[in-house]
Amino acid sequence: MKPAPAPSGSPSRPAVRRATVVWAVAARDLRLVTGSSAVMIPLVVVPLVFLVVLPVVFAVLAHLGGAAVVGGADLASLLQRMPLPIAGRLAGLDPPGQMLVLVLGYLMAPMFLVLPLMVASVIAADSFAGEKERKTLEALLYTPTSDTELFGAKLLAALLPAVAVSWGGLLVYASVADVVAYPYLHRLLLPDTLWLVLVLWVAPAVAGLGLGITVLVSARVRSFQEAYQLGGVVVLPIVAVVAGQAAGVIYLDAIAALVVGAALFAVDVLILGWGLRSFSRDALTSRP
Amino acid sequence: MNDAVILTRGLGRRFTHGEQHVEALSGLDLEVRRGEVFGLLGHNGSGKTTTVRLLNGILRPSTGTATVLGLDPGRDGPALRARSGVLTETPALDERLSAHETLALFGRIYGLSRTFAAARATALLEAFALADRAKDVVGSFSRGMKQRMALARTLVHEPELIFLDEPTAGLDPVAARDVHDLVRTVTAGQGRTVVLCTHNLMEAQRLCDRVAVLRRGVMVALGAPAALGHGARGGHVRLEVPAERRARAIEAVRDALDVHGAEHRGGGEGSGVRAGDAPGEVVLDDAAPVRVAAAVAALVHAGVPVFAAVPSETSLEDAYFELVGDAGARGEGA
């Protein structure tokens, strides 16, 4: 073995470099995510289905048979259950146009939040529980990061892609929705105020929620799959909102979305604070 | 004192799991000097890894204090870890990353610039004979190569203090020898201090300047491996005398050592002289030089020729098993 040449200088550690170190840990986690097909497949397939396949399928269904084709739904009775603002937006449109506005513009809006939730949960499960499963966490514990920095870096690695997928996803989804709906509406369907609030404000909060729940779950399980599956229960409130919307029980507008987002951010702070307390080096290496 | 890189006083850590309390380490008083290779010797569960974690600010002590590189590990953990490097018991490598990526990313985490981290990664791969596999994912490496990778990662930021936790566990003899060579290379003439945790007695004897033997979290011996070996009860000297005069020789040595031994040990113990297996062999238990000299002088005085005085091949292994016992060496109660 030949000795490796020594560095030309010791690594400096002024405060300004802390962010670089945190980013380096996050970059490592992100690189690990892209190297795993188990993690990447849901991260690619789910957005692809949601952002492209579903709008196109709905457009084809609307074109072929209108509302009657969509699961046998009775558009008229569905419209009757819709809150007035929605019914107003649908007035004057032919049935395919009504269906596209209702499904792509309204009912899919909360469903879109599944994307940041799923992305954050998958990456967090890999970053926390997966790292434990692969026994690679200990090497990170010996790096010159504080507990908070290490935790923050891992949050960053999950949160940034979730937000990027949400924001980028809106561009893709809105483009596809507008292309398929324009022949019926003769105007752009998206983005509207509700969608902008949901994606720019609520989506990061939802991502934080998925992240926080997965961090807590990861502390108690031993594998990526366990953490991912248990953390997945967070999707249930979103499904409930979608069902409530379809039943006309819930009306989600931009104001309601702003309030929901603020409430979720408050919950995020609590859950992530709890997660940080369980992420201390001492706690991680003391568990049997 | 100023030369001490590690100084601990009464250092201890207790783990509590439900109703169960485990004293993983207790009352550790240790001083490791700059530039030495210091061994922490003990079986699984003896407290070696706990010690490494305490000394790097990973675990908080339940009792006592530690100063490492002049820093308090509990308070100054990040600053301390910027100057120390730890080879963990399992390589803990990201198997999805390539060898070069692994080292470059860790270089970044240790605060090196992107350019410098990449250059450092290349240099280390060259030094550790892994340059031809730089672009391969670490998951495809053999166990010995992974251990070399892990050691390279430990050195990526040029640490002053290196902890090696079971560096050759599970390696075949050739890979283990390679790792030994690497350890010698990274310590030779560079003023680095190494703490080597091992249950491999041969490894400790070969590499360490001093060792501390841990048993169930308590340090039971401290010293140079050779000194510990000589201090073991298994250490003895065979004196070769004419066969027909052996009885006289034993009597003369016993008389001399009874007096000398009483002075030397404070009295109360036997002389520890017996006949050996060979016809002209006298065995002197306890090979302390002063006792050997007294025995030889007594034989000369009694007119018994001494053909040879041969120290037994006592080793750290003898000392270790004497200190921790067979049960301890098997890891019972760990």
Image (cartoon, rainbow, N blue to C red):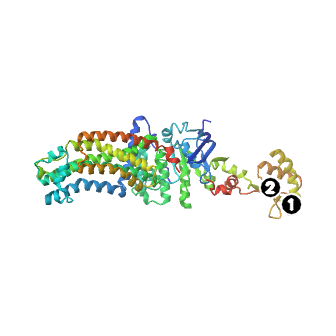
Instruction: Tell me where residue B253 appears, x and y as whole percent.
Output: 85, 53
Q: Residues within 10 Å of mark 1 (few under 14, many from 20)?
A: many
What is the x, y in percent for residue A146?
A: 46, 40
- How many labels, in total? 2
Label 1, on which residue? B246
**Residue B61 drawn above or below residue B198:** above
Give the labeled residue for mark 2. Answer: B284
What's the chain of the residue with tag 1?
B
Q: Nearer the viewer, residue B25 or B202?
A: B25
- The amino acid at mark 2 is Leu
Q: Residues within 10 Å of mark 2 (few under 14, many from 20)?
A: many
- Judged left or right of residue A43, residue A22 is right
Q: At which x and y percent is residue A38? A: 36, 58
Q: Looking at this view, is A141 or B17 the one in front?
A: B17
**Residue in the image at 30% along x and 41% along y:** A261
Coordinates of residue A266 in the picture (x, y in percent): 35, 39
Tag shown at residue A31: none
Q: CA distance from mark 2 to mark 1?
A: 13 Å
Q: Do the residues marked 2 and 1 share a common chain?
A: yes
Amino acid type of the residue that numbered disc 1 sits on in the rendered structure: Arg
Residue positioned 63% across, 44% down in the render = B26
Side of B221 relative to B141 (left or right): right
